[in-house]
Image (spheres, rainbow, N blue to C red):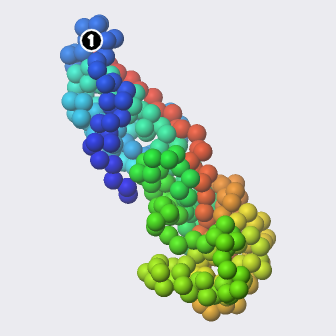
Amino acid sequence: MATIHDEDLARILRDDCPYSDPTTEGLGIAGQPARATLTARHDMTVCAVEEAGRMFELSGASTSIAVGSGTRAAARTLLLEATGPAGSLHRTYKMAQTLIEILSGIATGARAIVDAAQSVNPHCRVACTRKHMPGMKQWALRAIEAGGAVPHRLGLSDYVLVFEEHRTLLNDAAPLSEHFARLKAHAPERRLAAEATDIDGAAALARAGAEIIQVDKMTPEQVAATAAVLSTLSPRPVLAAAGGINAANAAAYAAAGADILVTSAPYQAPPRDVKVRILPA
C-alpha cells in the first residue's frame, strides 16, 4: 500500500493546531490522563487507522490499533484506542477521525465495485483513475488499495494512453500503425493503451498495435460486442471499460468481458462515520 510519511501527518496536525488549544488548556485539563476510542458507526472497509494512530503518537499519546486498513468492519467495531494527556488527545482526535472517515469512505466505495465485478468475473480488476483531489495522490492510493482496487495510472508520466485528443493532432498522411510504432520505440518498456468510443474504432486501434483497448462510455452490450471482436485477434488486447462504472453496473461490465474496470466513483463516496469518545484514563 501507499506509504504516508510522518511529515505528512505532522502537517495535518499543524494545520489544525498551529499554536495552542485554548479550550483544553483554559479548562485546566490538558495534563489529565485520558483515553480516546474511535469506533465505526456503520459497516465499512477500514482505511488509515494506522496513520491516525501515528498522529496520536506524534502528539505524545500511546495507541493500540484494533482493526487494520483493508478490513471489513461492522458497525460498533472498535478501530483504535489512544491513551495519554488530554491535551494530546484533543489536539489529535478530530484530524484522526476525519482522516479515517474520508479514506474509509473511498475504500468502502472501491470495495463495493470490486465485490460486484468479481462476483461474476474473479479475474476482473478495478482500476481507479487519477481524478482524485489534486495534491492528494498518496491518500487516494492508500484508500483505493485498502478497498481492493489498483491505480489505473499513477500520473501522466506513468502510462502510455492515446486519446482521441492525441490522434486529432497526428499527421493523417501516415497510418496509425506508424504512429504507434514510433510511440513504442519511444517508450519500449510500457504497453501501449488507446481509447475508443465505438466497436469499429476499438478494432482499428487494436490492429494498429494497441495492446490495451480502453472503451469509453459504452453499454455492457457494446462492451460484449467489442470483446467478441477483439477475441478474434492474436494476441488479444486487454479490454478496459471506462466511463460511468460504479457498484450498480460493475457486474454487468465484468460479465460482458472487460478485463479491467476503470472508475473514479470511489472518490465521490460519502465518508464513513467514526464515533469518538474521550474519557478519564
- Residue 19 image point, x, y percent: 28, 20
Amino acid carrying label 1: it is: Glu
Q: Secondary structure at mark 1?
A: helix
Q: Residue at x 48, y 61 (%)?
A: 155
Q: Which residue is mark 1?
A: 25
Residue neighbourhood size for the residue with mark 1, other residues' Cα within 10 Å, grouped as few (<14), some (14–19), many (≥20): few
- Residue 126 image point, x, y percent: 56, 63
Q: Residue at x 56, y 53 (%)?
A: 131
**Left or right of 183: which side holds 16?**
left
> Relative to residue 202, is residue 166 depicted above or below?
above
Q: Residue at x 60, y 63 (%)?
A: 262
The answer to whether residue 250 is seen in the rendering is: yes
> Relative to residue 277, is residue 8 depicted above or below?
below
The answer to whether residue 124 is seen in the rendering is: no
Give the quarter of the figure containing the N terminus. Answer: bottom left
Give the quarter of the figure containing the C terminus. Answer: top left
**Left or right of 13: which side holds 168?**
right
Q: Residue at x 34, y 11 (%)?
A: 23
